[in-house]
Amino acid sequence: MRQAFAKMFWGFLFVLVEIHIIAFDLLPDPLGYFFIYLGLEKIRSEYKTGNWSRLVALILFAFSLPTIFIQQTNNDFTGVSMSDGWPLYMNALGIGKLILVFYVFQIMIKLAQQFGDEAILRRTEQTFKAYIIAMLIVSCVQPFLMNTSRDAGIGAGLVLIGVSLIMDIVLLILLFKFRKLETDRLDTEEPVVDLKT
């Protein structure tokens, strides 16, 4: 459990953080999705859950390869203009990530139920609802920003970026918490007393 969720934590962190030197991403998204795949594979082998999530992670690994060399925040330096279809590609990548996160939440809910941890189960279900609703709103509003005035577009864009960032950080915190689910469960179990002696 610890290794699987540690891999997913670092994977989603790689996807969240973008550090470019010239045009090369130092924390490439494909590597992040590969880490997520490895974590999901470990969970599947140990707990027999998460088949679809691994496939989505592999698809995103391949689909996100261009982001290694092209900065995701569209600017003049990259030579990618709005008419080149880059925003459409980024929206598709965002939807793919949302689908992956949906499956990851389903796995976390199943594991919390399996280990009987009511507190982490409630927290996961609440975070799942908040994350999906917030990110769906961001995904739906984002395409309409190009039809607004420059000032309104910048203001709304900053709000959407802030919401996305907050929700991704909340997801990372939850993934970090799940690293200790198995050990926490073992620590709370009452020791077995041998009455035969």
Image (cartoon, rainbow, N blue to C red):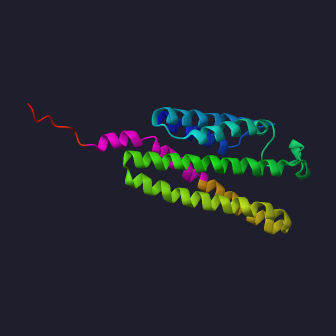
> What residue do we see at 51% from left, 35% from top?
44
**Position of residue 74 measured from the top left corner of the image (x, y, whole percent):** 82, 49
Look at 85% across and 66% down and name the residue there: 147
- Is residue 184 inside the magenta stretch? yes
Q: Depth check: 116 or 190 in front?
A: 116
Q: Residue at x 39, y 55 (%)?
A: 119
The answer, for residue 135, to whether it is visible in the render is yes
Q: Which is nearer the eye, 11 or 117? A: 117
Q: Main secondary structure of the magenta part?
A: helix
Relative to 83, say whether 66 is above or below.
above
Where is residue 58, by image quadrant?
Answer: top right
Residue 64 appears in the figure: no
Please state which of residues 34 and 152 is positioned toward the viewer in this rendering.
Answer: 34
Q: Residue visible at 38% across and 50% down?
A: 117
Residue 28's quadrant in the figure? top right
Instruction: Give the left or right position of residue 72, taking residue 53 as reference.
Output: right
Q: In the picture provided, is 101 more to the left or to the right than 173?
A: right
Q: Which residues are magenta?
A: 168-189
Residue 70: x %, y % from top left: 81, 40
